[in-house]
Image (cartoon, rainbow, N blue to C red):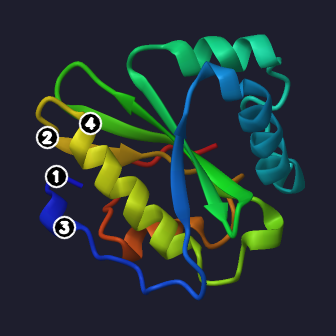
Amino acid sequence: MTSLDQLVPGETPPVPVELTEVGAESAAVVRSTYVRIWAPLRAHGRMEWSDEEWGAELSHPAIRTWLARVEGNTAGFVELERGTKGDVGIVVFGLVPEYQGKGLGAAFLTSATQKAWKIGTPTKRVWLQTSSEDHAHALNNYQRRGFHTFSTKPQ
């Protein structure tokens, strides 16, 4: 996405999705949320990271992380990484299984993308990466929000 104007907001969700920014002090919660999201998908990535490794990641100055909360419960999280040339990556994005398929993903991605456009200096591009290990509806959500395929690689 090369302009915030390309963002196509998702529909209003049935319940609000609130994003709360967190840091290294929330490493255990972020780690357990990551595992809850990707274990059912049999994804690898950061599944074996310790709380200390998560704490180091969340302490990096280019990294910003938000927990998605629904009615006070942790429903997912997003990690953004600010690049050096005006790029901001949505590096991790996901909802835990009990909140998937409930009309929350589009609103969550809309909010995450809006945050991504605000953290660069200035932001020139917001990107995300997906794979066949991601949730089956992930790519469709990304495309419906206005993201376009930049490159593909066989797995």
As drawn, the label of residue 6 is: 3
* Mark 2 residue type: Lys
**From the viewer's perspective, is residue 11 above or below residue 154?**
below
Report the side of 132 relative to 21 (left or right): right
* CA distance separating discs 4 and 1: 14 Å
Question: Mark 1 near mark 2, Cβ–Cβ under 8 Å?
Answer: yes
* CA distance separating discs 4 and 2: 11 Å
As drawn, the label of residue 52 is: none
- Closer to the N terminus: mark 4 or mark 2? 4
Residue for badge 4: 119
Q: Could you say which is closer to the camera, residue 149 or residue 134?
A: 134
Dot 3, crowdedness within 10 Å: few (<14), some or many (≥20)? few
In the rendered image, which quarter contains the C terminus? top right
Residue for badge 1: 2
Residue for badge 2: 124
* CA distance separating discs 4 and 3: 17 Å
- Quadrant of residue 25 in the image? top right
Residue shown at 70%/62% (left/top)? 72
Whether residue 150 is visible here, answered yes or no, is: no
